[in-house]
Amino acid sequence: MNPRTATVMRTTRETSIRMTLDLDGTGKTSIKTGIGFLDHLLEALARHARFDLALICEGDLQVDDHHTAEDCALALGEAIDRALGERRGVHRFGWALAPLDEALARAVIDLSGRPFADVSLGLSREAIGGLACENIPHLLRSLATAGQLTLHVDVLKGDNDHHRAEAAFKATALALRQAVAPSGFDDVPSTKGTLRGAIHE
């Protein structure tokens, strides 16, 4: 299998992002977004997916955290999409349960080529570590959109919002790791022969 890496540079009037991604890494990260809990969630995602991820974001945090959070997720999704290429030789599907103390999260992924996300985290706090809780499910939806994948994530139980959010990202990481893993076959796992914007497969 060819190296599955990508470099993404994303610059707008709201953010400037530089990112490198290796899907076949060891979970090594260097992440600086200016938002502590966003760094934490992205580190958990990369670590447990075993992706090597370097990300630097300079965002308009004087406005709020929304643009930085959204654009980092869009850039990561784009990097995953680029690194996967035509999605040949991958498992395609992945699913996982991940606990964090009293919290339990479930994630299911299809590298379908069709962006869709159904995310239900049940967070009740206004913010965690400088990241608005409303932006946490938005991160996952943005990742699915730019990554051209189908993503279902729900937190089945949990009392602590930090635990609920982190468990959701860990479950997503484990499902991603399974979906992108080499299948041992050199084909595109679709009845249509493509996972690039397919309608039915």
Image (cartoon, rainbow, N blue to C red):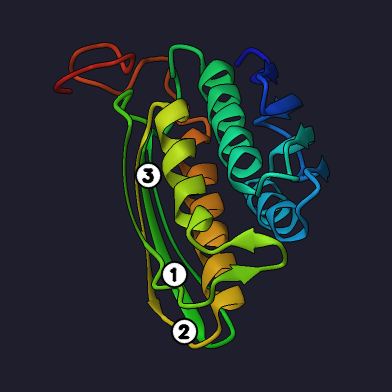
Whether residues under marks 2 and 1 lie with C-beta atoms below 8 angstroms apart, the answer is yes
Which of marks 3 and 2 precedes in the sequence? 3
- Say which amino acid is labelled 2: Gly
Local secondary structure at mark 2: loop
Please report the residue visible at 46 percent of the width from the left and 84 percent of the height from the top: 158
Dot label at residue 158: 2
Question: Label 1 to label 3, Cα distance in Å?
Answer: 14 Å
Residue neighbourhood size for the residue with mark 2, other residues' Cα within 10 Å, grouped as few (<14), some (14–19), many (≥20): many
Whether residues under marks 2 and 3 lie with C-beta atoms below 8 angstroms apart, the answer is no
- The outermost residue toward the front is 63
Task: Give the labeled residue for mark 1.
Answer: 105
Question: Label 2 to label 3, Cα distance in Å?
Answer: 22 Å
Please report the residue visible at 65 percent of the width from the left and 49 percent of the height from the top: 65
Counting from the top left corner in percent of width and height, residue 113 is at 33, 23
Local secondary structure at mark 3: strand
| Left/right of residue 109 with respect to residue 6 in the rendered view | left
- Say which amino acid is labelled 3: Ile
Question: Label 2 to label 1, Cα distance in Å?
Answer: 9 Å
Residue 189, by quadrant, is top left
Counting from the top left corner in percent of width and height, residue 200 is at 14, 22
Which of marks 1 and 2 precedes in the sequence? 1
- Say which amino acid is labelled 1: Ala
Local secondary structure at mark 1: strand
Please report the residue visible at 75 percent of the width from the left and 52 percent of the height from the top: 39
| Left/right of residue 9 with respect to residue 98 in the rendered view | right
Residue neighbourhood size for the residue with mark 1, other residues' Cα within 10 Å, grouped as few (<14), some (14–19), many (≥20): many
* Image height of 183 relative to 170, above or below: above
Residue 87, by quadrant, is top left
Residue 78, by quadrant, is top right
Q: In this view of the protein, which residue sits in the foreground, 185 or 17?
A: 17
Task: Give the labeled residue for mark 3.
Answer: 109
